[in-house]
Amino acid sequence: MIGVDESARFRRQHGAVASRLTGIATSLFFDRPVQLVDADDPKASHSGRTIVLERAEKNAIELAGKGGTIRYADPSGETTTAALVALLCANGGPVAADPVSLAVISLADRLAQTDIPVLIHGPTGTGKEVLSKFMHQRSARSDKPFIAVNCAAIPETMLEALLFGHEKGAFTGANSSGEGFFRAAHGGTLLLDEIAEMPLPLQAKLLRALQEGEVVPIGATSPIKVDVRVIACANRDLPSEVAAGRFREDLFYRLNVFPMTLHPLAERTGDIAPLAFAMILRHHTKGQPIPWLSESALAVLRAHKWPGNVRELENVIRRALLLASGKTAITTEHIVFDTAVRSVAASERAAVVPIAETVAQPVALPASGSRKLSKIVKQHEANAIMETLDACNGRRAEAARQLGISERTLRYRLASFREAGIAVGGSR
């Protein structure tokens, strides 16, 4: 296995585990070689980063420096292999065991050796930034900056200056010059997340930066050369955005030199167990025993639909760690899923009282009192925005004008609805 050295005793005593690990670890990459040993191997033989395996009546996992110890009862159990994969990847990098994800990681490693632009598609929370950072770390640019920019999180009026820089006095409040993200990432990698949210005028300037390898700061009269590898991420279908006139076709083809896709977590269930263990290792309370994920709890996790993908899984694990505090295992009673935000579709519209009616009469709340004011407001807002978009035949600029907000604010609202699980339709 690449990057993994097994002692002879380890292979004899833990052959079943080693066999299951072989097909996984060959597609994973570590920052340094890892030694797998048996608990009875002499400590003098341990060198570098070492992981110790031991057969025991109860499952347990302990951290020690850059390695640790795994005690397991069932060599064929999925949680045993998952715990080992998580510990192997504990120092960073993608955590995976599903064949689809392992193939993506292998492809990303090959792409890391080039400078061609990469466009990563995938729903929110699937790990696009983690994969982008992995490509940077595996590239010849690894000792240079890696800068991630969320295009939807920066106000439109600031995005150009933050990306391309500005000269002193270029605009009100510009008391000093700013180099911008492109120049800050010189020699390294610039990740442009949620690229579909970038305004059309800025898309033209980004296209020039990619084609010419230079940027023109606001207020400057001459371009500045930059050497940056650009990785773009999108959680929306860019060809559909191009067809709708919301994304430049020439920029799409410039970014889409090598497209990659990260599938929803529900479609790569083999990743759930190692990701869960990785989050247990990351978020457990220091100084307390690290709880083991039981097979029954794993079965519950595997059966879930995961609308929030890896980000939702992290929420569930952090919640389970709190509920299982002081215990040796996370069981089904500790698994509490996020409250689903139901789609603003037919069923949801039937449950929401029209705004005009709420003025005349109070909103009827269920006996459980589960309908929070903030949720009611968000649902009304989503309904109002989508009804206005429908009335404008999907034209965002016109809808924003009628709503009295900027088009940038409208894009941000739609993105927040998607992240919350509210259906807004692919054309929006």
Image (cartoon, rainbow, N blue to C red):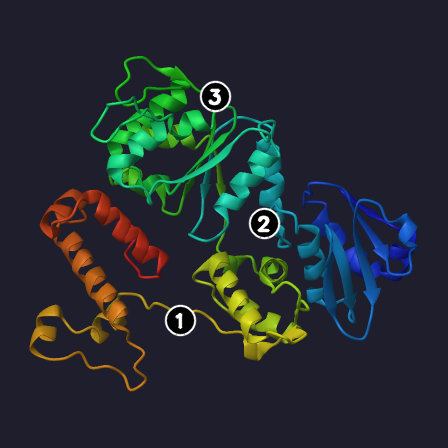
Image side of residue 132 versus residue 382, left or right: right
**First in sequence: mark 1 vs mark 2:** 2
Image side of residue 275 versus residue 243, left or right: right
Counting other residues with Cα less than 10 Å from the Cα at mark 2, is it few (<14), some (14-19), or many (20 or more)? Answer: many
Where is mark 2, residue-wise? Answer: 101
**First in sequence: mark 3 vs mark 1:** 3
Write the residue at 35% across / 60% down: 420
Counting other residues with Cα less than 10 Å from the Cα at mark 3, is it few (<14), some (14-19), or many (20 or more)? Answer: some
Q: Secondary structure at mark 2?
A: helix
Q: Amino acid at mark 3?
A: Asp
Image coordinates for residue 108, horizontal then vertical, percent: 58, 38
| Callout 3–callout 1 Cβ contact below 8 Å | no
321 vs 237: above or below: below
Q: Secondary structure at mark 3?
A: loop
* Residue 2 appears in the rendering: no
Q: Quadrant of the N terminus?
A: top right
Label total for image:
3
Image coordinates for residue 57, horizontal then vertical, percent: 81, 75
Q: Amino acid at mark 1?
A: Thr
Write the residue at 59% across / 49% down: 101
Q: Which mark is residue 227?
A: 3
Q: Secondary structure at mark 1?
A: loop
Measure the alpha-carbon separation of dots 2 and 3.
30 Å
Outermost residue on the top side: it is: 222
Write the residue at 31% across / 22% down: 217
Q: Which mark is residue 339?
A: 1
